[in-house]
């Protein structure tokens, strides 16, 4: 548990103070019952927020080794990723798995957040962070990411979520790195609409809701679409 969901909540909460997002509690993101019981994220969760420059759809992907399938459906939709590594643990086997998966599903760039630096004594912090940072850069280079130039921001998601101004600054620094380092994706708006469905939910009062990434084209209210898949194609 390196703190991915806590970081997701911290980003939304810190940006909400600038009027750019709606604050989200950890529990609102970590919303599947089996996750709360074990304190790990199993299903991917989606939230949205804005920075000064962009609007983001943020997918909180599971880190637990048993749930790599969910990670793939999340990662396959991404234009970039924030890799969260607990500075207290450094690169763990699942960190390597995530970097490899990100490469295999075509995530173009990664920004790294070194979490839990508040767990170190102040006099040890700089040295410990530097050691973990070197490991992470080596790992990224090994899987053909640009480890030498990847932004690595150190902080504490929990402290930022609790409102500590020093650590809130790190969250803003992280989002600034995401804004500048991860390229603006090019969208093919002129071709016919195509969206790969990642998941389907039934929401009370709303009916059936499908989530996924729009691969190309645009869709407007009351447009007719074809649902294509394992069952016969239908129009709706």
Image (spheres, helix red, strand yellow):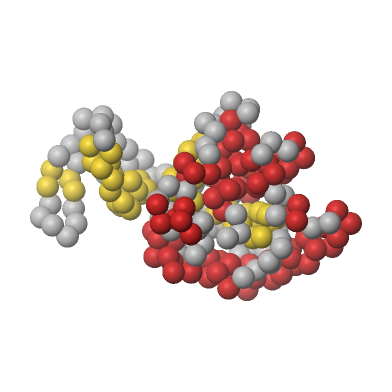
Residue beneath the point at 68% across and 66% down: 89
Disc count in the image? Answer: 0
Can you say which quadrant of the picture contains the C terminus? top left
State the image coordinates of residue 78 (x, y, percent, origin top left): 47, 53
Furthest residue in direction front, as rendered: 37
| The image quarter in which residue 135 lies | bottom right
Residue beneath the point at 54% across and 50% down: 5
State whether residue 118 appears in this view: yes
Look at the picture and state if 23 lies above or below 151: above
| The image quarter in which residue 176 lies | top right
Q: Is residue 104 left or right of residue 171?
A: left
Q: In this view, does 82 lie to the left or right of 198?
A: right
State the image coordinates of residue 60 (x, y, percent, origin top left): 49, 51
State the image coordinates of residue 35 (x, y, percent, origin top left): 45, 55
Residue beneath the point at 75% across and 36% down: 165
State the image coordinates of residue 151 (x, y, percent, origin top left): 69, 54
Furthest residue in direction right, as rendered: 123
């Amino acid at each position: 548990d390196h703190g991915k969901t806590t970081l997701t909540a911290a980003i939304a909460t810190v940006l909400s103070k600038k009027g750019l997002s709606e604050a989200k509690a950890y529990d609102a993101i970590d919303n599947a019952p089996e996750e709360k019981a074990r304190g790990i994220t199993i299903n991917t969760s989606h939230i949205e927020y804005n920075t000064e420059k962009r609007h983001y759809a943020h997918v909180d992907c599971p880190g637990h080794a048993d749930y790599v399938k969910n990670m793939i459906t999340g990662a396959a939709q991404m234009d970039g990723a924030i890799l969260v590594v607990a500075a207290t643990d450094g690169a763990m086997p699942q960190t390597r798995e995530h970097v490899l998966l990100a490469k295999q599903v075509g995530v173009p760039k990664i920004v790294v957040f070194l979490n839990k630096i508040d767990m170190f004594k102040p006099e040890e912090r700089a040295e410990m962070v530097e050691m973990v940072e070197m490991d992470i850069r080596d790992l990224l280079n090994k899987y053909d990411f640009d480890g030498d130039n990847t932004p690595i921001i150190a902080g504490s998601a929990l402290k930022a979520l609790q409102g500590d101004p020093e650590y809130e600054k790190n969250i803003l620094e992280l989002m600034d790195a995401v804004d500048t380092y991860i390229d603006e994706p090019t969208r093919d708006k002129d071709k016919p609409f195509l969206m790969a469905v990642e998941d389907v939910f039934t929401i009370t009062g709303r009916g059936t809701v499908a989530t996924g990434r729009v691969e190309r084209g645009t869709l407007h209210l009351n447009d007719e679409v074809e649902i294509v898949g394992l069952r016969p194609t239908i129009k709706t």
